[in-house]
Image: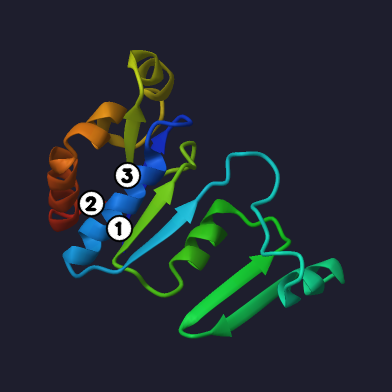
Amino acid sequence: MKTLHVTGFKNSGKTALVSHWITVLRSMGLEVAVLKHHGHGGAPELPPAHTDTVQFLEAGAVSTLVAGGNMIQLIQQKWQSFEELKSLAASNQPDVLLIEGYKQEVGEKIALLRNEGDWEDLKQLQGIIHKACTEDIFADISSLDEWLQKWVQEGGDK
């Protein structure tokens, strides 16, 4: 499994790039998993209040897992280490794991820059193997797609 962190500050295009790259990698016949850091403070949004899942959590369950239609939804009320989260995200053995955020963690990274000031703040991160300007994501993403395809084919992080 190859692993790549997509890092940058808020509104740098991380989610847009990860979403786009999922389609690029899928067109190459690769399976992709994503681990995303919820950097908005607090817990991620739960399903609607009337669902069984929320009822179970409110009753005190530490985790709920709903399975059906070839899909699993797991919610856990437990802190897990980054390595545990990576293992969970990769549990279905994808070819590529894209990690949005977690910029302080070890791994190969692409840094998305809104401006030169972002580079000043991000260049001390370990593992940056590529950097790109946010405007490139929306203007002409083809060079970033070519970089990704080369990274996947030539090895990348394993």
The residue pinned by badge 2 equals: 156
Instruction: Tell me the CA gap for discs 1 and 2.
Output: 16 Å
- Disc 3 residue type? Leu
Decide which of tag 2 and tag 3 comes sooner along the chain: 3
- Residue 12, visible in the rendered structure: yes
Name the residue rendered at 57%, 46% in the picture: 38
Task: Give the x, y percent position of residue 117.
Answer: 39, 14
Position of 136 relative to 5 (above/below): above
Position of 109 relative to 4 (above/below): above
- Disc 1 residue type? Ile
Element type where label 1 sits in the image: helix
Q: Quadrant of the C terminus?
A: bottom left
- Disc 2 residue type? Gly
Task: Give the x, y percent position of residue 5.
Answer: 38, 45
The residue pinned by badge 1 equals: 22
The residue pinned by badge 3 equals: 17
Instruction: Tell me the CA gap for discs 2 and 3.
Output: 18 Å
Left or right, 66 with respect to 52, comes to: left
* Rendering quarter of residue 119: top left
Task: Give the x, y percent position of residue 128.
Answer: 31, 34
